Image (tube, rainbow, N blue to C red):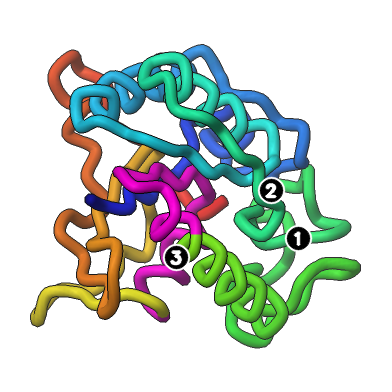
Amino acid sequence: MAIYVVRHGETRLNAARVFQRPETPLSERGRQQAQRLADRLAALGVSGIVSSDLARAVETAAAIGTATGAPLLLEPLLRERDFGDIRGAPYDSIGGDPFAADYAPPNGETWTVFYARVAAAWSRVAALAAATGGHLAVVTHGLVCRALVERHVALVPGSSAPVLWGNTALTEIEPTPPWTVRLLACTAHLDDDGMPSATGAV
């Protein structure tokens, strides 16, 4: 058994480095990426899927569901960090580092609030993994992937969490404590046909 944590496929806005709105769909490239990820997970044998309820994650999860036949559950705790009023704005238009530890987006989540939500999301994922009876796929977002790996699982000594996560990057985690990472942010399913993954945060 394993927990497979994946980032959603590419969208037009994340490729352009724009803070995304909840309704942002996958781009055509993102849909191709999601299909390749889905084929990879189908070969591994996924029994359940839990996903952020934001459109780009749902579309990615739906591709996995079609390929695997696994049931899909939507979980708002797995949403990307809420950037509030700057959603829709390019990263470089903010006038500072919007990912800095002391940056609080207007009407959005502080890092403290975001990390608390990710902790609750991981508790939910762990409970679902225990109840699934097979491999569980978790479809979420770049900052959530990074927070999970940095704060809630055990990395192989000498490794560290990537700062940026490729679209449809796959991380395999043991389903019981100490939640050891077996595979970290892998995008090999995109490499065999000239489709490298764009890295990003949200």
Q: Amino acid at mark 3?
A: Ala
Please give the label number shown on residue 143: none
Indicate whether residue 102 is drawn in magenta.
no
Q: Position of residue 50 (x, y in %)?
A: 53, 44
Q: Give the answer, above or below, for where 167 lies relative to 116.
A: above
**Could you give the CA–CA distance between mark 2 and mark 3, rounded to whole angstroms?**
29 Å
Q: Amino acid at mark 2?
A: Phe
Q: Position of residue 94 (x, y in %)?
A: 73, 62
Looking at the image, which residue is at 69% across and 40% down?
Answer: 54
The answer, for residue 15, to whether it is visible in the render is yes
The answer, for residue 199, to whether it is visible in the render is no
Give the secondary structure at mark 2. Answer: loop
Magenta segment: 128-151
Of the numbered discs 1 and 3, the one sitting upstream in the chain is 1
**SS assignment for the magenta stretch, majority:** helix
Q: Position of residue 68 (x, y in %)?
A: 37, 21
Q: Residues within 10 Å of mark 3 (few under 14, many from 20)?
A: some
